[in-house]
């Protein structure tokens, strides 16, 4: 029965890509869960095969849908996401949220003039007319933008929910007066940071529960290992590392047009407009050029992995946190070009080095065949089978593979499931936790899955489960929800510290 539902899902939606576009979380276009470096161009499987051939594994499932990126589905995208057939498989409250989120996204596109490109458009390097790269020879086309905007003009306008501006320690807009407890915590951080030699272990203990915005940039630099604990050495190290980074720019960046690197640069160039596409901050040419340089330099300095889709997301939290030193309000609309060139360069260099430190600990996620992610997905499956057997058996009953949803959770560190403000709070703890981005992340993913237990068990078909797991409603989450998630992950870590054994090898 489950297999029949799955086949009927693809039969009814012949032009649907193999991965449903995220709706609720950080609002990113989908990533192909099987091929991260690029989408297939020439593969043209006949859709009739979907009707006659049953799939018995995730790999067959993926192969049966990997041609969808080449299908001209411009006219069908809106119909698919709004189809009563798909929405009917969701609970009533989820149907309402699903519809509201569609309207919100459409309004956001209309208001900002930013159109998310389809996968086919990005393969042709057709980008939004507002995203103009000074270092690119791409010929821009605005026809798809006009068509999208014409479709959306009839939809009701909804306010855009800030994804970046509210990265401070509150869930609501505005800045309420600091409580006595918050002031005490901030004073403690300042005391630790002002000491001649910062006690990093003590700093980690205080950071686990969240870092005050005022001291987050310097704390992240310290916890990531970018800055030394000795206060007197920090300025010298910053100066040296920033000069070293821009030395790399002079040495390597011109090679982006070389035959050996042009494919890497092209993929980076395609992916950057997809990074937080509804946030104006990330659509500014100066910001996109910063991301291009960071990702290209990292890729050619790490040939074992090179650039892989998903790494582009990992720059954004560092960029936003370091930018917050100079921008207090309305960050998502702030014109970065208004900052001095020196400040822009410092933010760029610091983002590069801190992202590099993060990736040093999880680089096997991005090497050939991405073995780190494969192992972590298997580890999550084993862990969930011990934590909640009902959910595990529910997935087995309806033939849902963990790889179908958890690959992205591991590849992007849940960034595509959570608003950016929540990712930043989550990373406070990851920076403080030993092996936070690798080992502890596993338990966070398990806690995140169990958070939706009721909704998961209410789904009684393959496509309903897959849509739910790829579109979890976290858009209104804030620090409170992230704090509860982390507390549950901490509990799971110590209850199941011996599992999964193969993951610890």
Image: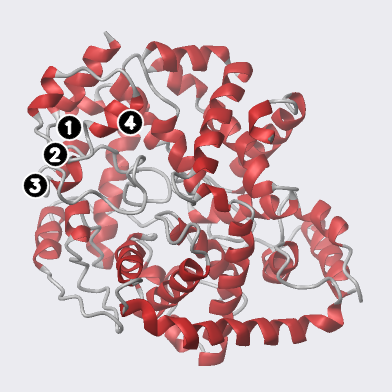
Disc 2: which residue = 79
First in sequence: mark 2 vs mark 4: 2
Residue depth check, mark 1 versus mark 4: number of the one nearer the observer: 4
The image position of residue 203, as x and y in percent, is: 83, 59
- In primary-sequence order, the first of circles 3 and 4 is 3
Q: Secondary structure at mark 4?
A: helix
Horizontally, is 13 left or right of 485 in the view? Answer: left
Marker disc for residue 83: 1
Label 3 secondary element:
loop
Quadrant showing the N terminus: top left
Separation of marks 1 and 4 at Cα, in angstroms = 12 Å
Q: Nearer the viewer, mark 2 or mark 4?
A: 4
Graded by Cα atoms within 10 Å as few (under 14), some (14 to 19) or many (20 or more), the crowding at tag 2 reads few
Residue 146 drawn at (x, y percent): 11, 64
Residue contact at pointers 1 and 4, CB within 8 angstroms: no
State the CA–CA distance, disc 3 to disc 4.
20 Å
Tell me the number on the disc at residue 467: 4
Label number found at residue 75: 3
Q: Residue at x 61, y 43 (%)?
A: 482
* Residue drawn where x is 38% and y is 64% of the image: 279
Residues tagged 2 and 1 counted as in contact (Cβ below 8 A):
yes
SS at badge 1: loop
Mark 2 and mark 3 in contact (Cβ < 8 Å)? yes
Question: How far, Cα to Cα, is label 3 from label 1?
Answer: 13 Å
Viewer-nearest residue: 492 or 151: 492
* Residue closest to the eye, 311 or 206: 311
CA separation in Å, label 2 and label 1: 6 Å
| Circles 2 and 4: CB atoms closer than 8 Å | no
Alpha-carbon span between mark 2 and mark 4: 15 Å
Circle nearer the viewer, 3 or 1:
3
């Amino acid at each position: 029965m489950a297999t029949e539902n799955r086949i009927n899902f693809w039969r009814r939606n012949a032009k649907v890509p193999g991965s449903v576009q995220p709706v609720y979380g950080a609002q990113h276009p989908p990533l192909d869960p099987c091929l991260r470096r690029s989408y297939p161009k020439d593969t043209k499987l006949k859709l009739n095969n979907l009707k006659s051939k049953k799939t018995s594994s995730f790999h067959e499932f993926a192969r049966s849908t990997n041609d969808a990126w080449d299908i001209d589905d411009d006219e069908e995208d809106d119909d698919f996401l709004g189809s009563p057939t798909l929405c009917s498989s969701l609970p009533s409250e989820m149907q309402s949220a699903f519809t509201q989120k569609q309207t919100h996204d459409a309004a956001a596109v209309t208001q900002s003039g930013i159109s998310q490109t389809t996968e086919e458009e990005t393969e042709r390097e057709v980008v939004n007319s507002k995203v103009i790269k000074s270092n690119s020879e791409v010929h821009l086309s605005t026809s798809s933008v006009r068509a999208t905007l014409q479709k959306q003009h009839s939809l009701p306008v909804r306010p855009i929910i800030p994804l970046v501006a509210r990265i401070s320690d509150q869930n609501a807009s505005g800045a309420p007066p600091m409580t006595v407890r918050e002031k005490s915590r901030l004073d403690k951080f300042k005391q630790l940071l002002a000491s001649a030699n910062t006690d990093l272990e003590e700093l980690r203990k205080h950071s686990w529960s969240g870092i005050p915005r005022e001291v987050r940039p310097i704390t992240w630099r310290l916890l990531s290992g970018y800055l030394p604990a000795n206060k007197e050495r920090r300025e010298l190290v910053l100066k040296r590392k920033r000069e070293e980074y821009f030395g790399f720019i002079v040495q390597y960046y011109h090679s982006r047009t070389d035959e050996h690197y042009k494919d890497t640069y092209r993929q980076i160039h395609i992916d950057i407009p997809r990074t937080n596409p509804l946030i104006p901050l990330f659509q500014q040419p100066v910001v996109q050029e910063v991301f291009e340089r960071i990702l290209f330099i990292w890729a050619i300095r790490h040939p074992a992995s090179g650039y892989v889709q998903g790494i582009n997301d990992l720059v954004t939290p560092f960029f936003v946190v370091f930018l917050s030193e100079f921008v207090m309000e309305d960050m998502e609309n702030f014109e970065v070009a208004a900052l001095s060139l020196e400040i822009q360069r410092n933010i760029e260099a610091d983002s590069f080095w801190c992202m590099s430190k993060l990736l040093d600990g999880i680089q096997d996620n991005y090497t050939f065949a991405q073995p780190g992610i494969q192992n972590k997905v298997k580890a999550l499956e084993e862990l969930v089978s011990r934590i909640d057997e009902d959910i595990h058996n529910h997935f087995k009953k309806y033939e849902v593979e963990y790889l179908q949803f958890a690959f992205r959770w591991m590849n992007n560190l849940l960034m595509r499931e959570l608003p950016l403000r929540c990712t930043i709070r989550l990373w406070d703890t990851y920076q403080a936790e030993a092996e936070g981005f690798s080992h502890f992340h596993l338990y966070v993913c398990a806690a995140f899955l169990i958070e939706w237990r009721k909704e998961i068990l209410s789904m009684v078909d393959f496509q309903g489960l897959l849509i739910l797991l790829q579109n979890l409603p976290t858009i209104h989450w804030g620090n409170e929800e992230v704090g509860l998630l982390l507390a549950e992950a901490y509990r799971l870590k110590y209850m199941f510290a011996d599992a999964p054994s193969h993951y610890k090898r």
